[in-house]
Image (cartoon, rainbow, N blue to C red):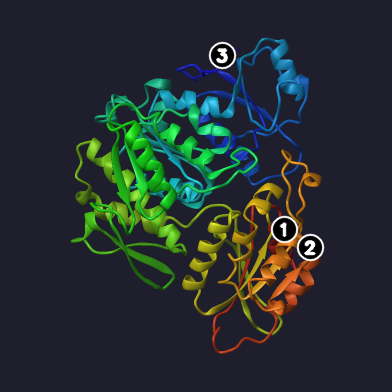
Amino acid sequence: MAKQLPENLKGVHIHFVGIKGTGMAALVEILFHAGAVITGSDVAERFYTDEILEKLGLKALSFSENNITDKIQYVVYSSAYKLDKNPDLIAAVKKNIPCVLYTEALGSYSERAYSCGICGVHGKTSTTGLTGTILKELNLPSQVLAGSVINSFGGTCTYTSPLIAEKERNQGDEASSENAQNFNGKNIFVAETCEYQRHFMSFCPKKIILTSVESDHQDYYPTYEDIRDAFVDYICKLPENGVLIYCADDKGAVETASIAGKKRPDIKMIPYGQNAKGDYRLSFGKVENEKNCFKLELFKNCGELAIAVPGKHEVMDAAAAVALCSELLRDAGIVPLSNYQNISRGLINFTGGKRRSEIVGRFKTKSGNDVVVVDDYGHHPTAVKTTLEGFREFYKGRKIIVDFMSHTYSRTQALLKEFASCFKSADEIILHKIYSSARENPSDFNITGLTLYEEVLKTGIEENRVHYFEEILDAKDKVLELLDAPLTGAYPDGYLFVTMGAGDNWKLGKAILEQ
C-alpha cells in the first residue's frame, strides 16, 4: 500500500475516514485548498469541526462500504479506525485503494514543504496558534496546521498565506515557489506534531519547537525515559544543521535537548525562557488590563510585547513562537528587528483556541453576580496547575470555581498525587468520575473518580471546598448555588467558572449558560 500522497493534488479524489477529527479536519482544509476533491465519513454526533467542513461545502457521510466509489484514488484514515473493522476501510482494501494513516498523510505533505514541527507534552496547540497568528503579519509564504480551532485563523484549524492560496487555486503544486526566499523554493509549513504512539515520527521537520517533556500517555510510555527517548528520536530526524528551539525552563526539555545534542552535534540548539541565554531570554512583565506583558532580549530596545490570554505558560508559548518566526525571517534574509511591530501585532491578535482557555459565555446570576464561563482542555496535572495559576493572576478580582474531569485511568493512577495537588489556585473544586479511553479497560485499575476526590482532601483543602458528583450534569444545581452566593470584598468582579479536562464536562458549562 502506498504511504505517500501525490505531489500534485489538483483533482485527486481523497476520502477521509474519521473526517471530524480535529487533525483530520485541518488536513482536509489544506488539501481542499490545494485542489483535491474531498469526501469523508464519521459518526453522526455533531462536533465543532462540522462547522469547518460545512464552510468548505462538505458533509460527513455515515460509515458505509457504499462510500468507496471507483472515483476515489486515496483513503486517509484516523488511527481510531482499523483497516479490518471499519466498513469504508474494508471496502477500500478490497478495491486496492491506497489507505494512508493520518500521520503518514501529514508526513507526506510535510516532505514537499519547508516544515517546522511543534511538539511537547504541553503547549503544542497554543504555540502553533501563536506562530500562525504572527506569520499572518509577516511576508513569508506559509501554511499552519493546529490541533484545534484557532480564533485568529478565522475559526478554523489552519492558516494559509494569501500568496499560497491564490496560486494553489490556479497552479496546483507550483504555488508561490518564487516567494519562498531561501527555503529551496518551498513554502513554510508549520504543524502541531503529536508524541502519542510516536506519531510525530512520520513528520519531516527542518526546525522543531520543543515546549516540554514529562511523563504522560502511560498506556504507551510506561516510564518517563520512554517518552523522553521518543522526543530524542524525533529531534534526530532533523536534517544536517537543522534547528531545535527548546524551553530552557523545562527540565525535561533541557535534558532531551542535551541527549539529542550529544547524538547530533550538528543540530543548532536555540533556547528560550527565563533561563535561556541569547536572543530569546524572557523577562515577565506586568499583568494588567487582561494582558500579559513580557520582554525578549532580541527586542530589548523596542519595548514590551504582550498577549491577551492568561497564564505565564502562554507567555512561554509566545516566546517559542516569536523565536521560530524570527529564525524563519533570518532564513529569508530579513532582520527580525525590522518586523517588531508586525510580531507585536500578531501576538496581541491571538485570542486562544477552541477549548484552550476559551471564554464560552458570561451572564449575571439572580443576585447580580457577574460570571465568566471558560472551557479548557488541560488534562495533565502540570497543565491544570499552570492554567489555574494563570487564571488566578489574570482574573484577580474573581472567585474561581473549577469543574475537573480526569481523562484516562492510566494517567490518573500514575499521577494521582500530582493531580490531587494541582487545584490550589481554585476557590471551589468539583470532581467527577474518570473519563475513560477506548484503549483501556476500567476494570484493570483500582482507581475511580472518588479516589481522586479523597486524595485532594488529603492535601489540606477544606472539605466544604471540594465537591464530588459522579455524573457531570448532576452538579448543575450546586454550581448555580455557588455562583449565586454573595461575594466578599476580595472578589469585586464576580466569578470565573472553569470546566477543565479532555472529557465531556464542557457540557456542564453549556447547561449553566442555557439555564
Identify the residue at horizontal 24%, vertical 50% (top origin).
Answer: 339
Q: Give the structural element (helix, strand or loop) at label 3.
A: loop
Question: Percent position (x, y) of residue 356?
Answer: 55, 55
Residue at 46% x, 29% y is 203
Q: Of label 3 and label 1, which has the lower sequence position? A: 3
- Quadrant of residue 159 in the image? top left
Whole-percent x, y for residue 117 in the image: 42, 37
Residue type of the residue flagged with mark 2: Leu
Instruction: Kindly identify the amino acid type of the residue bearing the numbered disc 1.
Output: Lys
Q: Residue 2 carries which label?
A: 3
Question: What secondary structure is marked by label 2?
Answer: helix
Left of 82 or right of it: where is 419? left
- Residue identifier under label 2: 473
Q: Report the residue at 25% width, 31% height from top.
A: 181
Q: Pick whichever of labels 1 and 2 is earlier in the sequence.
A: 2
Q: What residue is disc 1 on?
A: 507
Mark 2 and mark 3: Cα distance apart in space: 46 Å
- Quadrant in which the C terminus is drawn: bottom right
